[in-house]
Amino acid sequence: MPDRRGPNEQSLHAEITRLNKIIQALMNRAERNTSIQGSDFNMFQTAITLEDQVRRRTAELEDARQETEKITRALRESENRHRLLIENSPVSIHEIDLAGRIISMNRAGLVMRGVQEEREVQGTFYLDAAREADREIIGKLLSRALAGETCHFEFSTNGPEGKIFKSCFVPIKNKSGSTEKLMGITEDITERKKAEEQVQQLAFYDTLTHLPNRRLLLDRLRLAMAAGKRNNRYGALMFLDLDKFKSLNDTHGHEMGDLLLIEVARRITCCLREVDTVARFGGDEFVVMLCELDLDQKHSFEKAGIVAEKIRVTLAEPYLLKRSKDEGEEIFVEHQCTSSIGVVLFKGHNASQNDILKWADSAMYQAKASGRNGIRFFDIQS
């Protein structure tokens, strides 16, 4: 059975045992003599002195024993508290070995893994839960943790639910200072991520068309102007207003008007590259930004004109709008809608954002004044 006494308690116990043996030897020798004289008397004195030392050491031993029991009890209580905290924690707490296999996992972790018993995950690889696309980067981060660093990462799980987890791992070292395993905490942040996306959507995107709103457009315009300054390429901004939009709203209601705006947003998006931006500026006004057209101004005009014409023709195609009434009956409305488009080129910071928007808006009104369903370029030199 292992000796659970502390080092001090063990030392005292050994010394008391040694002294008792000496006392016993002296007493045995004294009993064999008939007189208490000379060396025999000295032996008795020595025995008495040793007995006094034994009493003191025995008292010290009792104090040490009580202190050891107190420390042991405190350690046991601390271990119980930590075990309760781990088992009742709302986040997954787990240990993995140097090969990445799970050693232990608390109840919350088992729930995240969709299992009932700890033995179902013991020996399995921690990375098995992560989707394939995330495993390489997570593996590299875990390698850094094995080297002694604390690592943080997020990953998505396999399966249709596509949950998102956030993990933190720290190395657990042995007495020699070598990492013997990793301890980690993993939290399900799926709902938090959804909430963040909703906030992002409300802050930077139009709720009806899901296009970037004015705020996000201005931020992207700022970035495009900075990029143009670096690469010396032109960009273009188009201000677009729908013709005859009000008549649809007045005749068939705002719900039909909303359906038209959604379809207009889809059609414009189909005319653009991924690097370009279309934003709903407000009402029936849209703004299109083309990035990195050309180094040459003339060629940039031509490219912007081609895209503007493509948008104009696409938006002029008939619209078949459908909505359902409360009774389940479907209503179809065919509508013809054109657009007036104003275009301006920009490069670097030769003009401010407000000026660029103002010039494109001015060109759009020129297109409207010229009979609508047309395109006008703003001449900065005029």
Image (tube, rainbow, N blue to C red):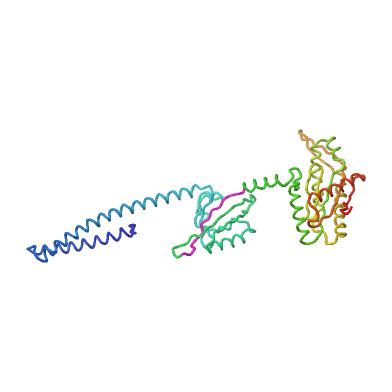
From which residue to which does the magenta span run? 177-190
Q: Nearer the viewer, residue 159 or 148?
A: 148
Residue found at the very far bottom of the displayed protein: 39
Q: How many circles with numbers are drawn on the protein?
A: 0
Residue found at the very far left of the displayed protein: 34
Magenta span: predominant SS is: strand
| Placement of the N terminus among the 4 image quadrants | bottom left
Residue at point 63%, 58% (across, down): 134
Residue 311, horizontal then vertical, whole percent = 85, 50
Q: Is residue 379 left or right of residue 206?
A: right
Residue found at the very far top of the displayed protein: 327
Task: State whether residue 174 is above or below residue 115.
Answer: below
Q: Is residue 349 magenta?
A: no
Residue at point 65%, 47% (across, down): 196
Q: Nearer the viewer, residue 314 or 42?
A: 42
Residue 103, horizontal then vertical, whole percent = 50, 57
Residue 114, horizontal then vertical, whole percent = 56, 50
Q: Is residue 26 left or right of residue 172?
A: left
Residue 250, horizontal then vertical, whole percent = 84, 35
Residue at point 11%, 66% (across, down): 39
Q: Nearer the viewer, residue 341 or 228?
A: 228
Residue at point 76%, 58% (across, down): 227
Task: State whether residue 323 is above or below residue 175.
Answer: above
